[in-house]
Amino acid sequence: MLLAGPEGSGRGTFLQALSTAVPWTASVAPGRLARGKAGASKLKGSWVNARPGISAEALTDLRLLKSFSAGVPSYGDPSQIESAKQGRRSHRTTKHVYATGGLPPLAAGDQFFRRILLVSFPKKLSPSGSGPGGTDPSLRRKLLEEKLLEEKLLEERDGILQWAAEGLRRVLRAQADGEGFPSARPAEKTRKRWESLSGPIGRFKAARLEVTGDPQDVVSKERLYRIYKKFCQQERVFAETKTEFTQTLTEDPRGEAKRRTLQSGGNQVPCYVGVKLTG
């Protein structure tokens, strides 16, 4: 599970509540886990690995994310093989919940996106004011005191646990009926959601572009980049360079950059192949 949103949007508070409700938690950075056995050993016995402040760069190790999302051990060292032989519980059964300010552009297959759960925290909570998105000043001052915040989480722990238990019952019912995870989105919807949280190019792809992989779907580079820059102006975000734009789009194996003839009798021009505009 990835919690994506700006600093101050509530994702950190969610992790605190989760760590309070689940007694067997760890907090190991994905980069440390990628380096091998030392990090993995800290997950023994933990149900959840909850880690805030994960950078987009730390999530670019697709090999690591694929391994976690598959929920199986990689058997990369002798201790893991020995554990599997003896039927002991692998550290890979630990569920990982990371909070991040943004997601990197990522070219991954449907299997990956079927197993990732994305939770968006889109709005940054105002530090003052009682309007929409804000918090009553006196209440916020109390909640910012660490001791009172811990007490509040302890008071709410039973309610959070009951909410989690009800979710587990839904999962077990769905499993018994031969259905998938009840709150899971189809892979393509999760992909679009990921893209919408992965910077201006990702947002543009999610809103205006469909990557089809069909060689008949062709758009000139000049035209598509012009539409992208206009999109960024409307969204009031910084537009990356044409080189960065091309590099990000062609990271998806379904699309590529090639020269094509768009008009009968015309010259070949640089194009994106396997993509088409929507909306």
Image (spheres, rainbow, N blue to C red):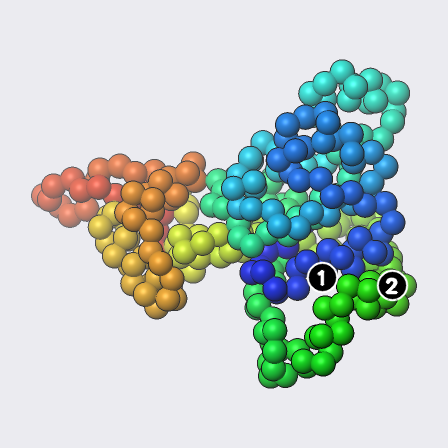
In the rendered image, the quadrant that contains the C terminus is bottom left
Q: Secondary structure at mark 1?
A: helix
Q: Residue at x 68, y 37 (%)?
A: 68
The x, y position of residue 160, in whole percent, is 83, 62
Compute the Cα span from label 2 to label 1.
13 Å
With 100 as the anchor, is 235 left or right in this view? left
Instruction: Say the numbered circle drawn on residue 23.
Output: none
Furthest residue to the left?
265
Residue at 78% x, 59% y: name it.
Answer: 17
**In what element is the residue under mark 2?**
helix
Cβ atoms under marks 2 and 1 closer than 8 Å: no
Q: Quick one: 73 or 274, which is closer to the camera?
A: 73
Q: Quadrant of residue 247?
A: top left
Residue 243 is left or right of residue 169, and the answer is left
In the image, residue 88 sits, relative to residue 111, either above or below, namely above
Residue sitting nearer the eye, 261 or 197: 197
In this rendering, is residue 237 above or below 136?
A: above
**For mark 1, what is the residue?**
13
Q: Residues within 10 Å of mark 1 (few under 14, many from 20)?
A: some
> Pointer 2: what residue?
154
The amino acid sitting under disc 1 is: Thr
Q: Earlier in the sequence, mark 2 or mark 1?
A: 1
| Neighbour tally class for label 2: few under 14, some 14-19, many 20 plus, Cα within 10 Å | some
Q: Position of residue 238 (x, y in %)?
A: 35, 58
Q: Is any part of residue 214 visible from this angle?
A: no
Look at 41% across and 46% down and name the residue there: 212
Can residue 193 be seen at all in this image of the molecule?
A: yes
The image position of residue 236, as x and y in percent, is: 37, 66
Q: Examine the rendered structure and indicate whether residue 67 appears above or below residue 272.
A: above
> Measured from the top left, where is residue 132 in percent x and y?
60, 81
Residue type, label 2: Leu
The residue lying at 64 percent from left, 38 percent from top is 30
